Image (cartoon, grey):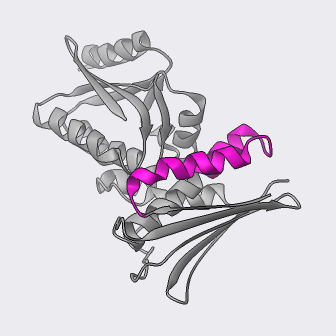
Amino acid sequence: MRATHKCKCTKENLEQIRHFVSDHLEGQIDSIIGEQIVLAIDEACANAIIHGNKSDPDKEIQVIISIENKQLEVEISDIGNNEISYTEADATDIQQLVAERRKGGLGLMLMHTIMDQIIFSNEDGRNICRLSKSLN
Amino acid sequence: MKIERTQLDNALKLGIIGDLDASSAIDLDQEMRTALDEGQVKLMIDCQQLDYISSAGLGVFVSYLQDFKEKSGAFVFYGMKDSVMNVFQILGLDQLTSIVPSEAEAKELLNEGDSQM
């Protein structure tokens, strides 16, 4: 299975991305795992839309999901000029976030917990986030 | 996403309806800020119609936990769907917050806090 979805870089479009992912995962994997995968992709797309493209409605984001040989691969790409820095969001301690009253930092924690691998790259002016997970 | 606000005798109830994601978390933030500014110390978060939560929504709750704690206040979540509870559990947030099945249990928990003060 392989499917592609494109939409403008607005936060309001996160819902349609979630529906796209859940529609294509339905029947392919366990529903709880599927919900977690939707969440991880939502987090990655929110990062790309908000931080990579400043929620610019003139920019586009593309999500490609594929399942082959029980391996899920997701590619989220945008044409953002900003390099996405994830160091600030790389919090590992939730108690630290509470004490510091921080709103950010949880997205990457969720992505790392849910997915097996996350790779960020910048290729030909596009920010690309690749997520993968074994469905065995 | 919609938030329904109900003032009870000794607590503020916020009912969250729909998806709490990066586009709607700002509304929750405004409600939480207003509650704090009003001097509310007890908050009941009705999650019965909360269909989805992402880090944006969780981040809002996390950012106010310390503020309520410092005012000797509390907030309790109730009626959470399994999919939402799963997200709290992934992050260990279920260990830092009170989550109960029903509104009655939420009220009881907040009243217990009163009797211990």
Say which quarter of the image contains residue A132. Answer: bottom right
**Which residue is painted at 34% across and 68% down in the image?**
A56
In the image, taking residue A131 as reference, residue A56 lies left or right, namely left
Magenta segment, prevailing SS (helix, strand or loop):
helix
The verdict on residue A26 being magenta is yes
Compared with B16, A56 (above or below) is: below
The residue sitting at the left extreme is B38
- Is residue A23 shown above or below A17? above
Near-viewer residue (A65 or A130): A65
Query: x%, y% of residue B21?
Result: 42, 46
The residue located at (20%, 28%) in the rendering is: B41
Work out whether B62 lies above or below A109.
Answer: above
x and y, in percent, of residue A125 in the image: 49, 87
Residue A12: horizontal and vertical position, in percent? Answer: 40, 51
Regarding residue A108, the answer to whether it shows in the image is: no
Residue closer to the observer: B59 or B48 = B48
The answer to if B95 sits in the magenta stretch is no
> Residue at horizontal 30%, vertical 13%?
B111
- Identify the image quadrant of the N terminus of chain A: bottom right
In the picture provided, is B95 more to the left or to the right than A53?
A: right
How many numbered markers are drawn? 0
Residue at the location (56% across, 48% down)? Answer: A18
Question: Can see residue B14?
Answer: yes
Q: Does A3 sit left or right of A53 as displayed?
A: right
Q: Which residues are magenta?
A: A9-38
Looking at the image, residue A7 lies above or below residue A16: below
Picture coordinates of residue B26 (x, y %)? Answer: 28, 47
